């Protein structure tokens, strides 16, 4: 259980201050036991020259208090500004992003009356490392990094979440039919860890058909775990089809630290008009109370909120003549929830929370070492206006007794030897040299690059080809 009731609060930008006021009003009415330190983050700090949107002293407050309730902030476009959300999640190691997406039929319009899905999104890895390079005139690259400890943490968290919250099934989405190593690892770790939780049903879907099913029949899903990018996209889809992005909160959980927020942004067009729905941030705050061990206050606040929704007291974003009774502003909505404190919803299921051990102990992660052998190198070459056969002939001249050009691909498709004339080629070639005697050393790569340099080859990067305990740690080219 978290040691303290002291939390850090940031009011954010746009609609942030209004929805934070509304949320804190409801928490106070629910008799949540909170001591608050407020920090300023976002636009004001970006404009003061802090390119990550936060001043150094605010980090100390966040790290000391360990629990952070954050309103949305505006990330200024361009100008080298980094997303503060991504920075906070990664700097503090908040590896799990938990996003419950629930429909409130018949009180909030939705095509999916039965929907109660929790998306658990990996929060630190994947293409969100932001490691991008332009390599040639025509080709840009974004690195997708997936680690075994990263997969183990998020998958284990998903199963533990399912057990603690009396969920029945955990589904994994991945694209391991294409990304056999990165998504393959995610899927493999999922299968390994699922075996440790025999009481929880487990299943895997390729993310494209899984996403289609989630959007079409969300009632088939319970807890869904996925990598960062898929989770980013699909949690917004899931929240929107449940009723509104304005209704979903999220928790970002790490080892001993956590941040709670709405899933939506700062909606600048609605700012300062007392219009925005505070429910997303509020439901994030309910997750925070559970995390803090304040289960009763969490349930009190959540049930009063459900009763308000059920009574048809709705902000503009969910107001419909058919489902609503009164259209209210942000402040009036918060007052309506506060006025219902202690009441239970009549038809929507009432919630109760166990005093959860929110601040979990860190997982033991696999950190084994395997026998790694260098067996080749992919040399990436920038070369416009050449045919694959001519490039193959030129680069074959670099062969030594030990290292031989075996394949050239362009955007992943093999074009040499025996390519097809129909394959479209850019100016970016992946040229695979493989050891002819089994293993090789870094010195062989250096010697190859030296010869390539002398021959005027414009190589732009290399990737080493390794085996791990004899298993290839690289994909073959399409058609290789
Ligand atoms: P947004 O989520 O802020 O708003 C999109 C639209 O959704 C709004 O125009 C509004 O119609 C509706 N909406 C969102 N929240 C609502 C609420 N509480 N009540 C009623 N309607 C609501 O997305 P955007 O316009 O693409 O982004 C605006 C800014 O927010 C950008 O600077 C973006 O970088 C930032 N952002 C911040 C966060 C965060 O702080 N966690 C998340 C996403 C986007």
Image (tube, grey):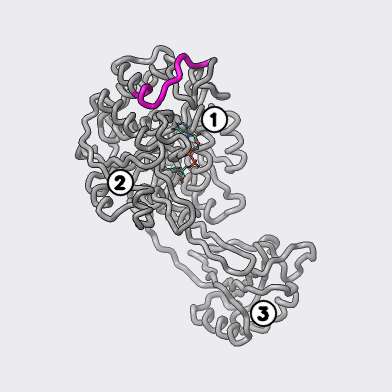
Packing grade of label 1 (10 A; few <14, some 14-19, many >=20) is many
Separation of marks 3 and 1 at Cα, in angstroms: 53 Å
Residue 167 visible: no
Residue at image point 23% right, 41% down:
37
Q: Which residues are magenta?
A: 323-334
Q: Residue 199: x, y in percent?
A: 42, 32
Residue 26 visible: yes
Packing grade of label 3 (10 A; few <14, some 14-19, many >=20) is some
Which quadrant of the rendered structure holds the N terminus? top left
- Up-down relation of residue 257 to residue 367 (above or below): above
Question: Callout 1: helix, strand or loop?
Answer: helix
Q: Please report whichever mark, 1 or 2, sits nearer to the chain's N-terminal start.
A: 2
Is 437 magenta? The answer is no
259 or 196, nearer to the observer: 259
Residue at numbered disc 3: 395
Tell me the number on the disc at residue 241.
1
Residue at numbered disc 2: 40
Q: Please report whichever mark, 2 or 3, sits nearer to the chain's N-terminal start.
A: 2
């Amino acid at each position: 259980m978290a040691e303290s009731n002291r939390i850090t609060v940031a009011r954010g930008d746009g609609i942030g201050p209004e929805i934070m006021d509304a949320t804190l009003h409801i928490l106070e009415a629910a008799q949540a036991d909170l001591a608050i330190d407020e920090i300023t983050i976002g636009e004001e700090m970006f404009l003061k020259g802090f390119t990550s949107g936060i001043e150094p002293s605010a980090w100390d407050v966040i790290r000391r208090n360990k629990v952070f309730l954050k309103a949305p902030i505006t990330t200024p476009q361009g100008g080298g500004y980094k997303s503060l959300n991504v920075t906070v999640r990664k700097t503090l190691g908040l590896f799990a992003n938990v996003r419950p997406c629930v429909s409130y039929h018949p009180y909030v319009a939705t095509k999916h009356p039965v929907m109660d899905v929790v998306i658990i999104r990996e929060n630190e890895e994947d293409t969100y490392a932001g490691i991008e390079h332009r390599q040639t005139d025509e080709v840009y690259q974004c690195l997708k990094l997936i680690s075994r400890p990263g997969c183990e943490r998020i998958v284990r968290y998903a199963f533990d979440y399912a057990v603690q919250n009396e969920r029945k099934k955990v589904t994994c989405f991945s694209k391991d039919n294409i990304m056999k190593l990165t998504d393959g690892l995610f899927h493999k770790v999922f299968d390994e860890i699922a075996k440790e939780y025999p009481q929880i049903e487990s299943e895997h879907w390729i993310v494209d058909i899984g996403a289609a099913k989630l959007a079409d029949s969300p009632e088939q899903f319970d807890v869904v775990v996925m990598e960062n990018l898929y989770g980013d996209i699909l949690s917004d889809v899931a929240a929107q089809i449940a009723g509104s992005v304005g209704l979903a909160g999220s928790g970002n959980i790490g080892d001993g630290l956590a941040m709670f927020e709405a899933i939506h942004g700062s909606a600048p067009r609605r700012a300062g008009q007392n219009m925005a729905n505070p429910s997303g941030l509020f439901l994030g705050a309910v997750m925070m109370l559970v995390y803090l061990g304040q289960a009763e206050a969490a349930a009190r606040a959540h049930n009063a909120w459900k009763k308000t929704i059920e009574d048809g007291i709705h902000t503009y974003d969910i107001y419909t003549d058919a489902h609503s009774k009164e259209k209210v502003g942000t402040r009036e909505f918060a007052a309506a929830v506060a006025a219902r404190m202690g009441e239970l919803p009549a038809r929507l299921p009432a919630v109760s929370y166990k005093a959860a051990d929110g601040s979990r102990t860190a997982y033991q992660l696999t950190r084994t070492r395997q026998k790694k052998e260098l067996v080749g190198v992919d040399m990436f070459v920038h070369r416009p206006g050449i045919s694959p056969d001519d490039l193959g002939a030129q680069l074959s001249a670099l062969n030594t007794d030990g290292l031989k050009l075996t394949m050239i691909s362009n955007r992943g498709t093999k074009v040499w030897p025996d390519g097809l004339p129909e394959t479209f080629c850019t100016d970016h070639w992946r040229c695979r040299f493989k050891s002819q005697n089994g293993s090789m050393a870094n010195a062989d790569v250096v010697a190859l690059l030296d010869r390539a340099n002398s021959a005027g080859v414009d190589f732009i990067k290399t990737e080493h080809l390794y085996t791990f305990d004899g298993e290839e740690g690289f994909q073959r080219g399409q058609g290789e």
